[in-house]
């Protein structure tokens, strides 16, 4: 935005994970002095972080949500002054409405017909964002919203059988889980359509795919924990599984907690979804998406596993 802007009572997300809030966000566009463009600045007044401030500072982009539901992106930000938590200062490349500056997709040519429209991806973003925020703050998931998103994805897949598959670019987000869930849902539905699933089966598959990694959001992942967990479970799975069992207690070091969450995230998700009275078939998809392959498992589970492996 090219004008001074002030937002109040702002919720702050980074990579679509809720990170905190501030009483006031102020955007001050940079002036041009001759041929020199000064950087644009922002101020976060009354910042309250859900986690440590250091985790907030290493992120690339900020996503802001106002009480009236509007969402904004602070692109490529950098904190420059944190001496006073009441007035945290920084610079950023740009600040704009999220709908106007939706994050990049994997490359596809302008004008080509795509599977999922930007509008539906924004709706999906809001749904997954709400799930992450609500679970971490101890509130329940709005399953009806998730089902509506699934139906929208199903409708667009069914209406565009020859369209190019457009997936969210994971590299443009800090948080892998958000984009991964939506991408897996998209891939699952494309496979399901090709295999002739009914509309009801597609809706069930879409909902299960959107929720399949919901168990991971009980833990505040960062890039280091993600890399270490991937390395341990891929190359020394026996040791990783053994160490994971030490992470059940919330008082254990973060690395053990991360291993525990990665190993048991399907069980954690199952417990949560049962409490919310989600349909048993959808819970089953979430529960077995990392289970060993079996000839007796439903076709939806086979599809979800394949989509998960491909993203």
Image (cartoon, rainbow, N blue to C red):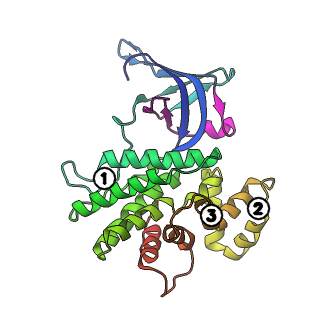
Residue at mark 2? 248
- Residue at disc 2, secondary structure: loop
Q: Which of the two labelled residues, at mark 1 and mark 2, occupies the earlier sequence position? A: 1
Secondary element under disc 1, as helix, strand or loop, is loop
Residue furthest to the left in view is: 111
Q: Residues within 10 Å of mark 2 (few under 14, many from 20)?
A: some
Q: In the image, 138: left or right of 163?
A: right
Q: Would residue 174 be visible to someone looking at this image?
A: no
Image coordinates of residue 178 in percent, x first then y, are 49, 52
Residue at 37%, 20% in the rendered image = 2
Q: Residues within 10 Å of mark 1 (few under 14, many from 20)?
A: few
Residue 265: which numbered mark, if any?
A: 3
Q: Percent position (x, y) of residue 9?
A: 55, 25
Q: In whole angstroms, how far apart are the C-alphas of marks 3 and 2? A: 12 Å
The single residue placed furthest to the bottom in the displayed view is 295
Q: Quadrant of the N terminus?
A: top left
Choose mark 1 or mark 3, whichever is in front: 3
Mark closer to the chain start, 1 or 3: 1
Give the percent coordinates (x, y) of residue 66: 49, 29
Relative to residue 117, is residue 182 drawn left or right?
A: right
**Gap between marks 1 and 2, in whole Å?**
41 Å
The residue wearing badge 1 is 107
Asked if residue 211 shows in the view, the reply is yes
Mark 2 or mark 3, which is nearer the start of the sequence?
2
Magenta-colored span: 47-76
Rounded to the nearest whole Å, what is the CA distance between mark 1 and mark 3?
A: 32 Å
Is 56 one of the magenta-colored residues? Answer: yes
Q: Name the foreground residue: 86 vs 157.
A: 157
Q: Residues within 10 Å of mark 3 (few under 14, many from 20)?
A: many
């Amino acid at each position: 935005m090219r004008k001074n802007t002030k937002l109040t009572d702002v919720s702050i997300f980074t990579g679509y994970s809720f990170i905190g809030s501030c009483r006031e966000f102020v955007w001050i566009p940079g002036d041009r002095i001759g041929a020199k463009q000064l950087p644009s600045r922002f101020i976060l007044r009354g910042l309250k972080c859900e986690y440590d401030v250091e985790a907030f500072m290493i992120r690339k982009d900020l996503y802001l949500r106002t009480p009236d539901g509007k969402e904004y992106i602070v692109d490529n930000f950098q904190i420059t002054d944190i001496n006073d938590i009441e007035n945290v200062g920084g610079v950023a490349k740009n600040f704009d409405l999220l709908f106007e500056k939706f994050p990049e997709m994997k490359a596809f040519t302008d004008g080509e017909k795509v599977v999922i429209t930007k509008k539906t991806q924004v709706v999906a973003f809001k749904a997954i964002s709400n799930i992450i925020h609500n679970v971490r703050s101890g509130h329940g998931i709005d399953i009806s919203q998730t089902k509506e998103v699934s139906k929208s994805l199903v409708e667009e897949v069914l209406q565009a059988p020859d369209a190019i598959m457009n997936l969210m670019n994971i590299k443009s987000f800090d948080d892998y889980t958000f984009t991964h869930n939506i991408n897996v849902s998209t891939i699952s539905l494309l496979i399901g359509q090709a295999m002739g699933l009914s509309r009801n089966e597609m809706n069930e598959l879409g909902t299960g795919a959107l929720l399949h990694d919901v168990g991971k959001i009980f833990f505040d992942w960062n890039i280091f924990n993600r890399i270490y967990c991937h390395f341990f479970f891929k190359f020394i799975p026996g040791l990783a599984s053994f160490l994971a069992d030490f992470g059940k207690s919330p008082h254990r070091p973060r690395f053990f907690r991360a291993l525990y969450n990665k190993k048991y995230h399907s069980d954690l998700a199952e417990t949560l979804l049962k409490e919310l009275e989600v349909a048993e078939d959808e819970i089953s998809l979430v529960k077995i998406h990392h289970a060993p392959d079996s000839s007796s498992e439903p076709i939806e589970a086979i599809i979800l596993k394949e989509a998960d492996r491909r993203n």
